[in-house]
Amino acid sequence: GQQVMQIPQYQHVQEGEDFTTYCNSSTTLSNIQWYKQRPGGHPVFLIQLVKSGEVKKQKRLTFQFGEAKKNSSLHITATQTTDVGTYFCAGHSGSARQLTFGSGTQLTVLP
Amino acid sequence: DGGITQSPKYLFRKEGQNVTLSCEQNLNHDAMYWYRQDPGQGLRLIYYSQIVNDFQKGDIAEGYSVSREKKESFPLTVTSAQKNPTAFYLCASRRGTNEKLFFGSGTQLSVL
């Protein structure tokens, strides 16, 4: 079945440093979604990427979808303490009707 | 406010007991989902329902059961057959395939 791997599992950064999490799928994805889960909270949708090579920005967050539609990344510029949480990618493959989630990257931002 | 409501927030299960987690949505979404989250891990799909009176097993359905008698409601029962039920359970819904998921605030289930 479809597998989605996400690295790193944990990342500690100093406030102001950049952060990147990577997502790799065993199969070609029709689209990929990113979610953020704050400590003690529930996942909240951030963005969806659909096109090969697509890049989208949300303020300090930059999302990329690979040319082969098998990988994606989330980059945060100049992290802030409000960025703390776990970031999940989740993808649909062509035949699967359900999202497969990555294991998440837990981001800690040290003040 | 439109959204998904899960209850209770915390639940304790005794040995051999079945417990039911509630999930209600007023978003008029057809599809509803149950996920299990273990510490430091991703979300694993337990059951999902695309339409009323129909549901499908996810990746880890053993020891769980669901019903979908109303569009708004998708309760999850954790049966005594689930030997390791301690986890954070998340209910979600969405309008259709390839749409984003809306999550409830979750239920933390622990075993006494």
Image (cartoon, helix red, strand yellow):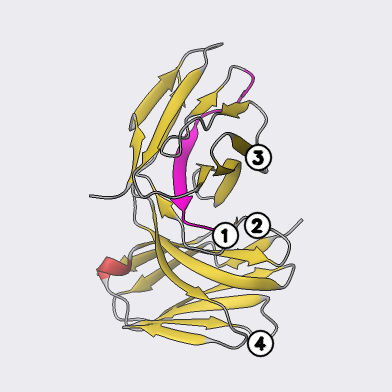
Residue in the picture at 74% in, 69% down: A27
CA gap between label 1 and label 4 equals 23 Å
Left or right placement of residue B35 versus residue A70 in this view: left
Same chain letter for marks 2 and 1: no
**Of callouts 4 and 2, the N-terminal one:** 4
Question: What's drawn in magenta, residue-wise?
Answer: B81-96
Residue indicated by mark 4: A67
Q: On what subunit does the disc labeled 2 rest?
A: A
Residue in the picture at 49% in, 35% down: B87
Q: On what subunit does the disc labeled 3 rest?
A: B
Label 4: which secondary element:
loop
Label 3: which secondary element:
strand
CA gap between label 2 and label 1 equals 6 Å
Vertically, is B64 above or below B24? above
Residue indicated by mark 1: B97
Q: Are marks 2 and 1 in contact (CB under 8 Å)?
A: yes
Specify few, some or many for label 4: CA neighbours under 10 Å numbering under 14, 14-19, or 20 or more.
few
The amino acid beneath tag 2 is: Arg
Residue A107 image position (x, y, % from top left): 41, 65
- Determine the image quadrant of residue A83: bottom left
Residue B37 visible in image: no
Residue B73 image position (x, y, % from top left): 43, 35
Left or right placement of residue A68 versus residue B91 in this view: right
Specify few, some or many for label 3: CA neighbours under 10 Å numbering under 14, 14-19, or 20 or more.
few
Residue indicated by mark 3: B56
CA gap between label 3 and label 1 equals 14 Å
The amino acid beneath tag 3 is: Gln
Q: Which of B105 and A15 is in front in this view?
A: B105
Q: Are marks 1 and 4 in contact (CB under 8 Å)?
A: no
Q: Residue B87 lies in magenta, yes or no?
A: yes
